[in-house]
Amino acid sequence: MKIERIQCHQLLGATVDGGWPEGHEPQDDLHTLVEVHTDEGLSGVGSVFTGSALTQAGVDFLEPIWKGATANEPERLSELMRQSSFWQGRGGTVEHVISGIDIALWDLFGKICNQPVSRLLGGVYRDRIQPYGSMLFDEPDVLAQRLQEVIGRGFKAIKLGWRPFGRRNNAFDEKLVATARETVGSEVTLLVDAGGSEQFWPHGYKWALRTSQMLAAYDVQWFEEPLAPDDIEGYCKLREHSPVPIAGCEVLTRRQSFQLWIERRAVDIIQPDVTKCGGLSEARRIAWMAADHHVQFVSHGWNTAVGLAADLQLAAAIPNASYVEYLTPAKYIEDIVVVPFLVDDQGFLEIPDKPGLGIELDRDALAQFSC
């Protein structure tokens, strides 16, 4: 079975604001689905955290490598694309596109073998996992209303991130966290993401340490991206002294970039994004490296239904996975699959056990977002 073509699906009209200063509009081109088609009619689908124009350019650039290649060797082909695009890759668009193709190849491989991806990744450690509802901070009254909506959907863990947290003053940050804790009560897990990968992040170690102490007083379970993403020395120092576990590394790509952060234990929780870091093949290597160093693993997933499905399959196959990120509300997750993801009464998601990623795209719904 050979790869015949790779199709890019735009996702427009329901893009969720990511929290950056300029914001995101529903028509912004931020995520792309890629579909790998074979000469025998089977196909697999992946997700790329990159707009459709750049994704298409990456697919075209890599075409001499994937065109006509064997369709049932995802890890080998992804590594071949990575090694062969050395000067243009090593991160950025090319690695993001390789990520989406890799996910699609695993989906395809599962369908060929009639097995869920989790089993092909090495075996199933769990058949369900707790998602955390991922949302942005907002003004206190709006924040309280949105938190009540997320709780109403069954989430028992919630992550709040980015603006306006960390953008005004310490007193306002505490007011936001206090509002969140008062709204959700003591039984819901709270996580906080400062969004330190925002351009020109102004805060350093002392702000992060002081903020971590405030978060501990409200029983926040981790502090994500409190520092600029390249400040490994600051992260190492903060992780050692913070009373709250430190999470990060969503911006890194390729396993080699994660290695130093893991070996130096710069974070308590490592967060590769399968739609950027190199796909399931790279994320699996990163997760096992983390397990060997007693670092917790949680996929970053500001994402689509396909990205979430990939995160679920990976979480099933990794012993040190503890959560999956579930962007909420998000039409690119909830409206493009035939069978929707459902949070059960205990706040867990079942991990699909059908072949491949275990989901089926609703083609009519997908067409509404592809312009």
Image (tube, rainbow, N blue to C red):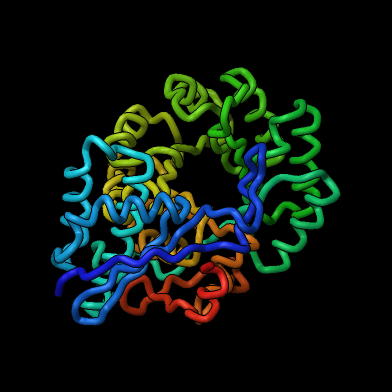
Q: In this view, does 287 lie above or below 38?
A: above
Pick the front one: 184 or 97: 97
Is 121 on the left-hand or right-hand side of 126?
left
Identity of the residue drawn at 61% across and 53% down? 134
Pick the front one: 127 or 282: 282
Is 343 on the left-hand or right-hand side of 148?
left
When asked about the image quadrant of residue 133, the answer is bottom right
Pick the front one: 99 or 52: 52
Task: Measuring from the top left, give residue 241's x and y in whole percent.
Answer: 53, 23
Query: Split into 4 quadrants, where in the image is the N terminus?
Result: bottom left
Is 166 on the left-hand or right-hand side of 334?
right
Task: Measuring from the top left, give residue 105's x and y in whole percent.
Answer: 27, 65
Identity of the residue drawn at 26% across and 79% down? 42
Q: Is residue 216 above or below residue 319?
A: above
Residue 133 visible somewhere in the drawing: no
Is 263 on the left-hand or right-hand side of 352?
left
Identity of the residue drawn at 30% across and 59% down? 101
Residue 154 visible somewhere in the drawing: yes
Pick the front one: 22 or 196: 22
Q: What is the count of numbered marks? A: 0
Task: Measuring from the top left, give residue 14's x and y in whole percent.
Answer: 62, 62
Task: Measuring from the top left, give residue 76's x and y in whole percent.
Answer: 16, 55
